[in-house]
Image (cartoon, rainbow, N blue to C red):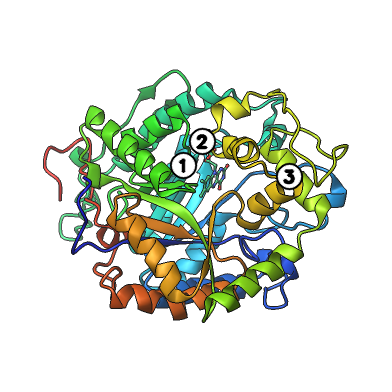
Amino acid sequence: MNHDRRGETMRLGAFFHPTGNHVAAWLHPGAQIDAGTNFRHYAQIAQTAERGKFDLMFVADAVAVRDGKLAALSRWPQYMVYFDPLTLLPAIAAVTKHIGVVATATTSYNEPYHIARKFASLDHISGGRAGWNVVTSSNLSEAYNFGREEHYEHGERYDRAVEFVDVVCGLWDSWDDDALIRDRATGRYFDPAKLHVLNHKGKHFSVRGPLNVARPPQGYPVLFQAGSSEVGREMAARFAEGVFTPQHTLEGAQEFYRDLKGRMARYGRPPEALKVMPGLNAIVGRTAKEADEKYRYLQSKIHPDVGLELLSNALGGFDLSEYDIDGPLPEVPDHYGVLSSQTSLRNVVRWARTEGLTIRQLYERFAGACGQRTVTGSPVDIADEMETWFRRYGVDGFLVHPAYLPGGLDDFVDLVIPELQSRGLFRAEYEGATLRENMGLKRPPSRYSAVST
Ligand SMILES: Cc1cc2nc3c(=O)[nH]c(=O)nc-3n(C[C@H](O)[C@H](O)[C@H](O)COP(=O)(O)O)c2cc1C
């Protein structure tokens, strides 16, 4: 896998925080200030991403507002007020034709039947464009909304998630693809032999089935995953078809790519059945200087209260307010075990120790990109970076996080996409009708049939 890859195209997803990915995005005069509750805004950015031929748009989620110091939260609207993804995306599906619609839903605070039903419905409504980002939730605030005083422990979360996904897929197979014969002549609506009762009784769930929605057009909506820990990777290897991950160096990305694809054989899966799509916080200008100015402008808008809060969250709630903001990061006690278990958060400590960053520099790096890699430059600079990572097997594509919306996405679509297309690295037209077809993923057969359709 270390030769140059030719003749392949990359997968691109668009990640939509309402006002944009940068913590200070909403302060940019070009950002849609009420984005979280503005459907027209979402419709517009979805259509722009579709104009850019993105494989998918992705909406993250938590079932709680963020907890923290109100002084900081009141300056930082991300994930405070915004639409429920599974209510938003069917409406988006109605105003788009090709782009995949991918919603996050947690396995910790849902029941499999609900999730199977909602995503099957989204897949039908969108004509086979649905995807589910399976998360286990990393956020204690969610526990308090669901009758719990603490969040499930990391290993248990993943254990529950694996069973959850298995049940959901089983429910999606409730009806064979050709079960609904709807034959007026015989008066038979469905073939009883083609309806299957799951009868699942497991460690976490007991679900009889069948599902009250027909088998999704894609068989299963495309399954995504975004955990990078040991158990997270193992779960991805087992069933994920797209993986979102923060990767900051090509070497790290290549290691992650090899590791993840290497694990798939254990589950009888070929490496191409999973697309690795690291985050890319691209800040594009017509020239490198213009891009740099855009970036500096956003960075200058980070309020220290917000920066400290973000960093403190990343460190498992460790309070940094007593420390010199221009001094080094102190020793951080690992109260919640997050540093040892959550790869993405470990990056912060590594940056502090290996690069000697101060608290301010750390939060600036982290806050600007929400933990993802930032690349600033001209369209050629950005495309060069993307091409190198792609050709050298660090990625199968990227999850592009526009810094502010809608302007940051317009820039990417108008400036970077044509550059990628002219290099033959990205499609000029959608290849298929479904998200699976566009991503080059096979339609899964039903567990009840030996032969797939
Ligand atoms: C791009 C990206 C998007 C994510 N979106 C969500 C999300 O919407 N909701 C959520 O609870 N967690 C989300 N996560 C967090 C992951 O699901 C996971 O909990 C986190 O990466 C820690 O993984 P680990 O426990 O395997 O280390 C996201 C992570 C990444 C990298």
Tell me which numbered mark, 1 or 3, is placed earlier along the sequence.
Answer: 1
**Image quarter of residue 313:** top right
Residue of label 1? 134
Q: Position of residue 272 (x, y in %)?
A: 23, 47
What is the count of numbered marks? Answer: 3
Q: Amino acid at mark 2?
A: Thr
Task: Kindly report the distance in space between the C-alpha atoms of the residues bearing marks 1 and 3.
Answer: 35 Å
Residue of label 2? 107
Q: Amino acid at mark 1?
A: Val
Classify mark 2: residues with Cα within 10 Å, few (<14), some (14-19) or many (20+).
many
Q: Describe the element under mark 1 as helix, strand or loop.
A: strand
- Residue at left 69%, top 32%? 316
Q: Describe the element under mark 3 as helix, strand or loop.
A: loop
Query: Left or right of 121: which side holds 264?
Result: left
- Residue at left 60%, top 56%? 369
In the rendered view, tell whether residue 352 sits above or below residue 279.
above
- Beta carbon of the mark 2 residue lies under 8 A of ligand 1: no
Q: Is residue 95 visible?
A: no
Tell me which numbered mark, 2 or 3, is placed earlier along the sequence.
Answer: 2
The foreground one among 212 and 142 is 142
Q: Position of residue 387 (x, y in %)?
A: 34, 63
Q: Position of residue 370 (x, y in %)?
A: 62, 52
Q: Amino acid at mark 3?
A: Thr
- Residue at left 69%, top 56%? 78
Query: Which circle marks residue 358 in the picture?
Result: 3
- Beta carbon of the mark 1 residue lies under 8 A of ligand 1: yes
Q: Position of residue 275 (x, y in %)?
A: 32, 49
Q: Quadrant of the N terminus?
A: top left
**Circles 2 and 1: CB atoms closer than 8 Å:** yes
Classify mark 1: residues with Cα within 10 Å, few (<14), some (14-19) or many (20+).
many
